[in-house]
Image (cartoon, rainbow, N blue to C red):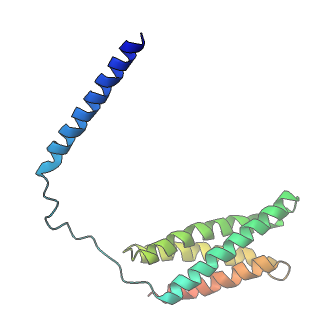
Amino acid sequence: MQRRTLVRASLLLGAAAAATAGAQTEHSHHDHGAMAPKVPMGKPAPAGLVNAYQACVAAANACIAHCQVLLAQGDKSLGACLRTALDTELTCSATLRAATLQSPYLGALAKTSVAAMQACIEACKPHVEHHAECKRCHDACVAAVRAANALG
């Protein structure tokens, strides 16, 4: 019984190796040394944009944590603040990644993140006098919106 299992395993490994070898020879007709198709590259992002977005992501994360603690304690007044901070963190992180990779999609992502940050600014406004995390998130969003608008 054990010998049959070993024979089957050997056959399976042999078949897998043959399939891999066949796949490698099948693809050997590609000339990997030839010129690759041109992939569009964006321009380097201004340092001000990268710094502003890094600060915004950090502030949004702090705001998210703060809102979650208060919500867990039963304070539902920060529900909209939490929702918009989550959207801000998501869209700003994606935009920041696009900026560091010089993606040609940076402009489109920046526009999306600006919409999220504007919603976050509005949601944070009622809380800026009472919660330092909301004030920092609000202010970081304002600065990041300015930096994104400077992209043109």
Q: Is residue 97 toward the left or the right of residue 8 in the image?
A: right
How far across and how far down the image is residue 145, in percent?
Answer: 57, 83
Q: Residue furthest top?
A: 1
Q: Is residue 145 toward the left or the right of residue 138 in the image?
A: left
What residue do we see at 76% from left, 82% from top?
Answer: 135
How far across and how far down the image is residue 86, in percent?
Answer: 65, 65
Please tell me which residue lies in front, 75 or 95.
Answer: 95
137 up-or-down from 47: above or below: above
What residue do we see at 24% from left, 38% from top?
Answer: 20
Task: Give the quadrant of the C terminus.
Answer: bottom left
93 up-or-down from 152: above or below: above
25 up-or-down from 96: above or below: above
How far across and how far down the image is residue 97, in percent?
Answer: 48, 72
What residue do we see at 31% from left, 24% from top?
Answer: 10
What residue do we see at 65% from left, 75% from top?
Answer: 58
Looking at the rendered structure, the number of numbered marks drawn on it comes to 0
Please tell me which residue lies in front, 134 or 115.
Answer: 134
Give the quadrant of residue 30. Answer: bottom left
Q: Residue furthest front?
A: 3
Q: Is residue 73 toward the left or the right of residue 116 in the image?
A: right
Task: Give the quadrant of the N terminus.
Answer: top left
Please tell me which residue lies in front, 7 or 148.
Answer: 7
Q: Is residue 118 toward the left or the right of residue 37 in the image?
A: right
Give the quadrant of residue 91. Answer: bottom right
How far across and how far down the image is residue 88, in percent?
Answer: 62, 71
